[in-house]
Image (cartoon, helix red, strand yellow):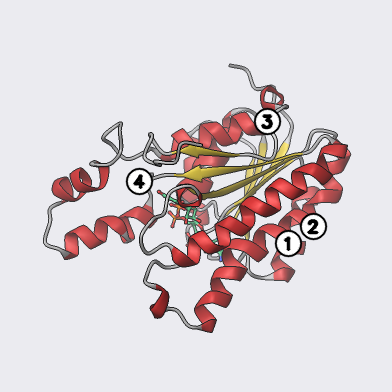
Amino acid sequence: MNLNLTGKTALVLGASRGLGLASAIELGREGVNVMIGSPGNERHEQALYQLRESGVTNAQALTIDVRNAAHAQRAIDDTVARFASLDILVNNAGGPPFGAFGAFDDDAWQNAFELSFLSVARFTRLALPHLRRTGEGRVINIISYSVRHAVQGSILSTSMRMGVVGLAKLLSREAGDYGITVNNVAAGMILTDRIRESALKNKFDEGKSEQQGLAELTDEVPLKRLGRPEELGALVAFLASGRASYINGTTIQVDGGLGRALL
Ligand SMILES: NC(=O)c1ccc[n+]([C@@H]2O[C@H](COP(=O)([O-])OP(=O)(O)OC[C@H]3O[C@@H](n4cnc5c(N)ncnc54)[C@H](OP(=O)(O)O)[C@@H]3O)[C@@H](O)[C@H]2O)c1
């Protein structure tokens, strides 16, 4: 399917690896100019290399900690200065830690709020004047299937993602006046460093092999495997395109059927 995205510009946050990088690659393959951002510079070279290896010719990287207001303004300004427009904003970052309610103090809640909720509100607000100009701007938030399926230990993440769901729905009603769509992509269990360093590591800590760990993690997934990052990136690229012009204010899961909610 030709998504007709050539020449558009995307700012993809949390994109030095994982779901952000996969989204940047899928957008870049469609001819989108991509600005990727993450807090540390050390992975940028590798990410840009992966983008080039995937056939993406127009990509650059910026140091962006989504919790930092100055970084946010600079990221928007630099993207527009470099590529002359901003058509697509992909809000994404690493998620907050897993654990029981009692494990988290005010600092942990504040960090989760800044990382997973305030960043989305702030970047979207700063991007909106540019997105309005294009007449078909896109805001795509990468969140978790836990907004529809209670995931043990995800209390910090899920509390913030539910806020993003509300924000996206209400914003979609305002931004629609300018042809902007606002949607959430809810990740299930997709094999990235986050899964390797959390769910899979827990299995290793229990003395299980990688094969056993993966089998247990995928037991509840109807497709009996973890997702591949590019399977989520493909949806991001589709939502960014004119082919998805009437999809607005919604949350779409990429979870192999893992979530048990009926709606
Ligand atoms: N993978 C899954 O199965 C899954 C499931 C549900 C939800 N999610 C959510 O989807 C999002 C992406 O997950 P992932 O699996 O791709 O994670 P990941 O592999 O850990 O990658 C996270 C990315 O976010 C960047 N990042 C971390 N802190 C940041 C910050 N403060 N500001 C900007 N960027 C930051 C990281 O940069 P560095 O490389 O510099 O650290 C990295 O590029 C997370 O919010 C996660 O909770 C993922």
Comparing 52 with 252, the one in front is: 252
Helix, strand or loop at mark 4: loop
Crowdedness of circle 1 by 10 Å Cα count: few (<14), some, many (20+)? Answer: some
Quarter of the figure with residue 155: bottom left
In this view, the residue in front, 257 or 58, is 257
Q: Amino acid at mark 4?
A: Leu
Identify residue for label 2.
Answer: 126
Disc marking residue 170: none
Specify the label residue 191 is tagged with.
4
Q: Kindly indicate whether the residue at mark 2 contacts the one at mark 1 (C-beta within 8 angstroms).
A: yes
Q: The N terminus is located in which quarter?
A: top right
Q: Position of residue 245 (x, y in %)?
A: 72, 27
Q: Earlier in the sequence, mark 2 or mark 4?
A: 2
Separation (CA) of disc 2 from disc 4: 31 Å
Of labels 3 and 4, the one closer to you: 3
Q: Nearer the viewer, residue 51 or 182?
A: 182
User: What percent of the width, then of the height, locates residue 128?
Assistant: 81, 50
Q: Is mark 1 within 8 Å of ligand 1?
A: no
Location of residue 91 with respect to 55 vertically, above or below: below
Indicate left or right for 220 with 94 as reference: left
Q: Position of residue 198 (x, y in %)?
A: 32, 61
Three-letter code for the amino acid on which mark 2 is drawn: Leu
Please say if 15 is above or below 224. below
Q: Which residue is mark 3?
A: 247
Residue contact at pointers 4 and 1, CB within 8 angstroms? no
Residue position for label 1: 122
Mark 3 and mark 4: Cα distance apart in space: 27 Å
Is the residue at mark 4 in contact range of ligand 1, meaning its CB lies under 8 Å from it?
Answer: yes
Density class for disc 3 (Cα within 10 Å; few <14, some 14-19, many ≥20) is some
- Give the spatial CA distance, label 1 vs label 2: 6 Å
Q: Nearer the viewer, mark 1 or mark 3?
A: 3
